[in-house]
Amino acid sequence: MLAIIVTGHGDFAHGILQSAEMIFGKTHNVAAVSLAANESIETLTQRYQHAIDQMTAMTELLFLVDLWGGSPFNTASQLVATHPRTYGLLAGVNLPMLIEALALQQQSLDQVIPHLEQTARGGIRHLDLQLDMGDDDLL
């Protein structure tokens, strides 16, 4: 089973996981790991390891990170580098990506990662209102 660690700065990881569970339902082998402004990389590494140790029946692990190049990304990438065949990492996590990842936990990283990249891109859209609507019709 694919385990997932959602991670990022501040309370982002906990908030996005809570939102995903409101839509998707209760999750298994999924953890939110946060980094507060005053915490060290060593603390974050310990939190990652603790989350990994709590996973059951895990065959692969996917880190879903808020921001490419930030401390949560850099720390997770070091773990991925030591387990290149069984750990993966995607940055720029958004809610559609996370929900899709939860639905695909029975699949392999090789299948999941490219699918999640597409899902995340598809989740970025703008509202295109028709120009012929009057201002009163907008609300």
Image: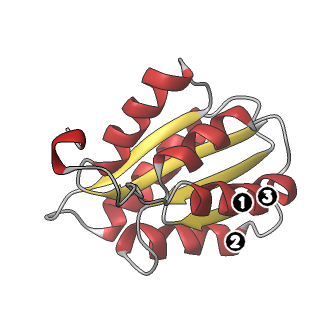
Three-letter amino acid code at disc 2?
Answer: Thr
Q: Position of 73 compared to 88: left or right?
A: left
Between 115 and 61, which is closer to the camera in this rendering?
Answer: 115
2 and 1 marks in contact (CB < 8 Å): yes
- Is residue 82 placed above or below 52 in the rendered structure? below
The residue under the point 48% across, 65% down is 92
Q: Secondary structure at mark 1?
A: strand
Q: Position of 135 compared to 26: left or right?
A: left
Q: Which residue is mark 2?
A: 82
Q: Quadrant of the C terminus?
A: top left
Q: Position of 40 compared to 114: left or right?
A: left
Q: Secondary structure at mark 3?
A: loop
The residue under the point 35% across, 56% down is 132
Can you tell which quarter of the image residue 59 is in?
top right
Q: Which residue is mark 3?
A: 86
Can you tell which quarter of the image residue 46 is in?
bottom left
Between 3 and 54, which is closer to the camera in this rendering?
Answer: 3
Q: Residues within 10 Å of mark 3 (few under 14, many from 20)?
A: some
Picture colour scheme: secondary structure
In the rendered image, residue 28, in percent from the top left (x then y), is placed at 61, 25
Q: Which residue is mark 1?
A: 87
Three-letter amino acid code at disc 1?
Answer: Tyr
In the rendered image, residue 45, in percent from the top left (x then y), is placed at 43, 61
3 and 1 marks in contact (CB < 8 Å): yes
Mark 2 to mark 1: distance in Å?
A: 9 Å
Mark 3 to mark 2: distance in Å?
A: 9 Å
Q: Quadrant of the N terminus?
A: top right
In the rendered image, residue 133, in percent from the top left (x then y), is placed at 31, 50
Q: Residue furthest top?
A: 26
Q: Residues within 10 Å of mark 1 (few under 14, many from 20)?
A: many
The residue under the point 24% across, 40% down is 137
Q: Nearer the viewer, mark 2 or mark 1?
A: 1
